[in-house]
Image (spheres, rainbow, N blue to C red):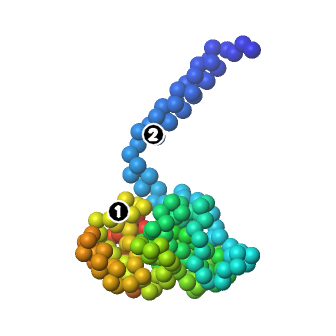
Amino acid sequence: MHRPPGLRLAGGLTIALAAALLLLADAQPARDSDLFDNELCIVAPATPYDPASGQPLYAPRPLPAEARCPVCGMYPARYPRWAAQVIFRDGAAHYFDSPVNLFNFLHKVSRYERRYTLDDVAVSYVRDFESGQWVEAGQAFFVQGSRVAGPMRNADLPAFANRAAADAFVRQHRGTVLTAPDMTPDRLASLSRNGRHRH
């Protein structure tokens, strides 16, 4: 098929423009995505409870490989030592790549999950950094300011089942031991990458 020269030129310009835009997009530093403030992250809804699993309704669940953190969009199963989860009263669950994102979620549930409120949360769990066992977030101890980088490449509050283990971690890696009531919005903003998750 013969195309007029003007049409061939327009098609060539379109391809050149698209290629230039792709090259520019690849050249942009990762921090440029901060301009969007996580508003473009589309995360799957909460994972429903499966009665066939044989687990109690509010027991901690294994991390599904496909689950994404509702706060940052990362895959918690890729960071099992740092993982956290929240279970709602109907048994549905959300999974988080770090305790920081769990607490960010709990401070403003409606920002990340429109179907639930904080009153709908039945229980939340964090992973003990050493044993990998699930611990209720309200019973855990967290270390802020250690030299150990988490999934977001900063100190993402490694969690411990007891104070002695948290203190031992601090002696080896520095930091300060905190508990769940210490996780105020201001403190979380200082822990979140670039302070993005402000509430």
Q: Is residue 40 visible?
A: yes
**At label 1, which amino acid type do we have?**
Ala
Where does the image place residue 12, in percent across and percent down from the top left? 58, 22
**At label 2, which amino acid type do we have?**
Asp
Q: Is residue 182 visible?
A: no
Residue at 59% across, 71% down = 62
Q: Is residue 171 left or right of residue 130?
A: left
For discs 2 and 1, the disc positioned in front in the rendered view: 1
Q: CA distance from mark 2 to mark 1?
A: 26 Å
Give the answer, above or below, for where 33 lies relative to 112: above
Q: Find numbered disc 2 in the image and state the secondary structure of the residue it sits on.
A: helix
| Nearer-N-terminus badge (2/1) | 2
Q: Which of the numbered marks, if any, corresponds to residue 3? A: none
133 vs 179, nearest the viewer: 133
Where does the image place residue 196, in percent across and percent down from the top left? 40, 64
Give the residue at mark 1.
Answer: 149
9 vs 90, nearest the viewer: 90
Give the residue at mark 2.
Answer: 26
